[in-house]
Amino acid sequence: MRKIKPRVKYQGVSLPVPFIKEIKEHIKHRPAYRSIADYTREAIREKMYRDNHTVFKAGPPPSWSKPVTVVKPSQSEIDKKFQDYIDKKFKLLKKEILEKTKK
C-alpha cells in the first residue's frame, strides 16, 4: 500500500478500521456531518474544550455555532405507527391461535 501524502496545511491520522466503520455507521444517519474528517474534527474540538483547552485558532466546534434541528414525529404519527404495529401483531397472534385450535 502506498503512502498518501497529506496536503500542505493538513496532517494525517491513522485509526483502526473497525473504529472507522463505526464512525461511518454513526454519521450515516446524521446529516450534520459530511465526512469522517468532519465528525473527527468536531469530536476532537469538543474533547479539547471539555478538557479546558479553550484556545481554538480554527474557532469553536461547528455544532456549537450552528445548532442542528432535530425533526420529531408528531404524536399522531407515533400513534398511527404504534397502532399499525399492534394490528400486525394481533393478526399474527390470531392466526397462530386459529392454527393451534385446528389441530
Image: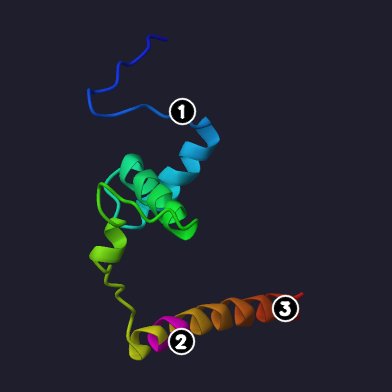
Mark 3 vs mark 1: give the one in front.
1
The residue range painted magenta reads 79-83
Asked if the residue at tag 2 contacts the one at tag 1, i.e. Cβ–Cβ closer than 8 Å, the answer is: no
Q: With respect to residue 31, does 82 lie above or below?
A: below
Of pointers 3 and 1, the one earlier in the residue sequence: 1
Task: Give the numbered dot on residue 83.
Answer: 2
Mark 2 vs mark 3: give the one in front.
2
On whether residue 13 falls in the magenta region, the answer is no
Main structural element of the magenta stretch: helix, strand or loop?
helix
Question: Which residue lies under the disc numbered 1?
Answer: 14
Asked if the residue at tag 3 contacts the one at tag 2, i.e. Cβ–Cβ closer than 8 Å, the answer is: no
Horizontally, is 92 left or right of 32 in the view? right
How crowded pointer 1 is (Cα within 10 Å; few <14, some 14-19, many 20+) is rated as: few
Question: Which residue lies under the disc numbered 3?
Answer: 102
Horizontally, is 37 left or right of 49 in the view? left
Which residue type does callout 2 highlight?
A: Gln
On whether residue 81 falls in the magenta region, the answer is yes
Q: Residue 66: image x %, image y %?
A: 23, 65
Of pointers 1 and 2, the one earlier in the residue sequence: 1
Q: Marks 2 and 3, how far apart in space?
A: 28 Å
Q: Residue 50: image x %, image y %?
A: 47, 59
Asked if the residue at tag 1 contacts the one at tag 3, i.e. Cβ–Cβ closer than 8 Å, the answer is: no
Image point 33% across, 40% down: which residue? 37
Identify the secondary structure beneath mark 1.
loop
Q: Residue 49: image x %, image y %?
A: 42, 57
